[in-house]
Amino acid sequence: MTKKALVTGVTGQDGSYLAELLLDKGYHVIGVKRRTSLLSTDRIDHILDHPNFQLVYGSMNDSGSMYRLFASHKFDEVYNLAAQSHVRVSFDVPEETVDAVAMGPLRLLECIRTMQPHCRFYQASSSEMYGDNPEHPQNEETRLMPASPYACAKVFAHGLTRNYREGYGMHASSGILFNHESPRRGETFVTRKITLAAARIKLGLQNKISLGNLGALRDWGYAKDYVEAMWLMLQQDRPDDYVIATGETHTVREFLDEVFQIAELDVDKYLVIDERLKRPHEVPWLEGDCSKARERLKWEPKTTFKGLARLMYEADLELMSRSISR
């Protein structure tokens, strides 16, 4: 019998990779997209005509749209990936961020509890929840000390998922994903900003790159590897929370140097530090311990730091080259 999965935020980086994975496994996938004036389906254009894929409009801010979805479909699995996910932007639009990131999952969990309680639920938690806690590496038991409106909202949704798991016996799991990147990462996120800038500079389309805090330490993995862990969580007999990470930490400066070295460019000729790009409350060090996922899910990252930097740069170089030839 074909399984049916709901994926919120399907047009995002993670949603697009997850939809591909589920379709490859024979699922029928319903992807939810917010209504906007632009289509913004470029990450999933290649699967829009897949016979087992359906794109629908909905909103995490609208309970009615969710209840209508559950009235029309019987889901085996629900993956909540929808969010205003840019941490720096969450300081500028905190109320909008919190409503989507915290209240959205609450509305979705209530919908599942009342309509399809046997449906399995995945919540996209975040390493940003650890905030400025100096302890590292961070695991599932590390104290959460959120340092942004986005992170505070994620902590609420993370606790809520556990509450519904323990209180109502729901199969609800959270993946505490550390930074995960890809050629599908949004252009305002620092890794993609770096790889795009390097490609544009290489092709003579740009003459500088403006960045904020180069000293922030992050645990960077490949998004395509990480969505497999999401799926594995919902295949377990017992729901739980899992850290998904590489266990390696690098500074923004290291990622910048690696990409510009691959591009054979002298980064110091193009780098500009812009204080406006720094967060009001910085998160200095994120490093994940994914021992639990390795042991129980039999999951481990496949892509190295250097491999990630190369595949992202080469994809952006090809993208920019195509734009010139048009």
Image (cartoon, grey):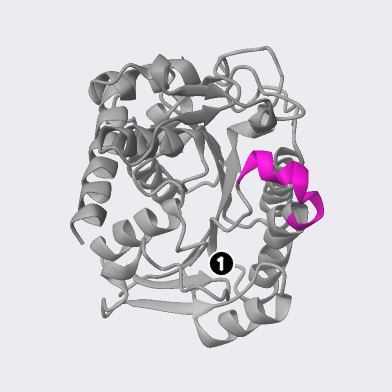
Residue at screen point 38% across, 42% down:
223
Q: Position of residue 141 (x, y in %)?
A: 65, 24
Q: Position of residue 214 (x, y in %)?
A: 54, 18
Instruction: Say which amino acid is labelled 1.
Output: His
Whether residue 228 is visible, yes or no, is: yes
Within the magenta stretch, is there residue 108? Answer: no
Place residue 131 in its image quadrant. Answer: top right
Q: Residue furthest right?
A: 95
Q: Is residue 10 above or below residue 63?
A: above
Q: Is residue 204 above or below residue 220?
A: below
Residue at screen point 70% across, 24% down:
282
Q: Is residue 28 above or below residue 92?
A: below
Q: Nearer the viewer, residue 267 or 170?
A: 267
Q: Is residue 186 left or right of residue 129?
A: left
Q: Quadrant of the C terminus?
A: bottom left
Place residue 37 in its image quadrant. Answer: bottom right
Residue at screen point 45% across, 63% down:
11
Q: How many marks?
A: 1
Q: Quadrant of the N terminus?
A: bottom left
Q: Position of residue 224 (x, y in %)?
A: 33, 44
Which residue is label 1 attached to?
A: 118
Q: Nearer the viewer, residue 152 or 279?
A: 279
Q: Which residues are magenta?
A: 86-96
Q: Secondary structure at mark 1?
A: loop
Place residue 57 in its image quadrant. Answer: bottom right
